[in-house]
């Protein structure tokens, strides 16, 4: 996930595309060195897909598993009644015993 305060210009998009295609990327490394484009460092391939990915209207797909990035994942409807954030999980990950990530329960908290 790449964060930027403002929408990227055509020149910035080209610069980022060139940087990504010309460099070898290693999990947890800085993706691009720029003041206007920020990336989270220290992410690993074992981390869940970020919630921001799913909330992005242009990029996010609701059917991508938050663990393995496989398509065909779904959000547990019963959990959506109790939590504002429910991450999608594919059938293969459920079979491995992985539980959907949930956050922000409805109701009052102490």
Image (cartoon, helix red, strand yellow):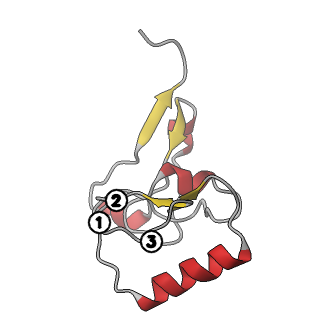
- Residue 83, percent from left and from top: 52, 32
Residue at the spot of label 1: 28
> At 72% across and 77% down in the image, what residue appears?
10
Q: Who comes first in sequence, dot 3 or dot 2?
A: 3
Tell me if residue 58 comes above or below residue 5 in the rendering. Answer: below
**Could you tell me which secondary element the residue under label 3 belongs to?**
loop
Tell me if residue 40 comes above or below residue 82 in the rendering. Answer: below
> At 40% across and 57% down in the image, what residue appears?
40
C-beta proximity under 8 Å, tags 2 and 1: yes
- Residue 43, percent from left and from top: 32, 60
Q: CA distance from mark 1 to mark 3?
A: 12 Å
User: In the figure, is residue 78 to the left or right of 101?
Assistant: right
Q: Residue furthest bottom?
A: 22
> At 43% across and 69% down in the image, what residue appears?
33
Q: 80 or 16: which is nearer to us?
A: 16
The quadrant holding residue 109 is: top left
The quadrant holding residue 95 is: bottom left
Q: Who comes first in sequence, dot 2 or dot 1?
A: 1
- Residue 63, percent from left and from top: 57, 64
Q: 70 or 79: which is nearer to us?
A: 70
Nearer to us of marks 3 and 2 is 3
Q: 3 or 50: which is nearer to us?
A: 3
**Could you tell me which secondary element the residue under label 1 belongs to?**
loop
Nearer to us of marks 1 and 3 is 3
Q: Which mark is residue 41?
A: 2
Q: CA distance from mark 3 to mark 2?
A: 10 Å
Residue at the spot of label 3: 32
The quadrant holding residue 17 is: bottom right
């Amino acid at each position: 996930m790449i964060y930027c305060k403002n929408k990227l210009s055509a020149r910035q998009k080209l610069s980022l595309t060139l940087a990504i295609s010309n460099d070898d990327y290693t999990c947890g490394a800085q993706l691009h060195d720029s003041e206007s484009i920020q990336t989270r460092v220290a992410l690993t391939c074992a981390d869940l897909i970020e919630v921001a990915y799913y909330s992005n209207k242009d990029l996010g797909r609701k059917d991508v598993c938050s663990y393995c990035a496989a398509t065909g994942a779904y959000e547990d409807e019963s959990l959506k009644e109790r939590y504002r954030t429910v991450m999608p999980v594919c059938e293969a990950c459920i079979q491995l015993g992985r539980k959907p990530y949930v956050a922000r329960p409805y109701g009052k908290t102490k």
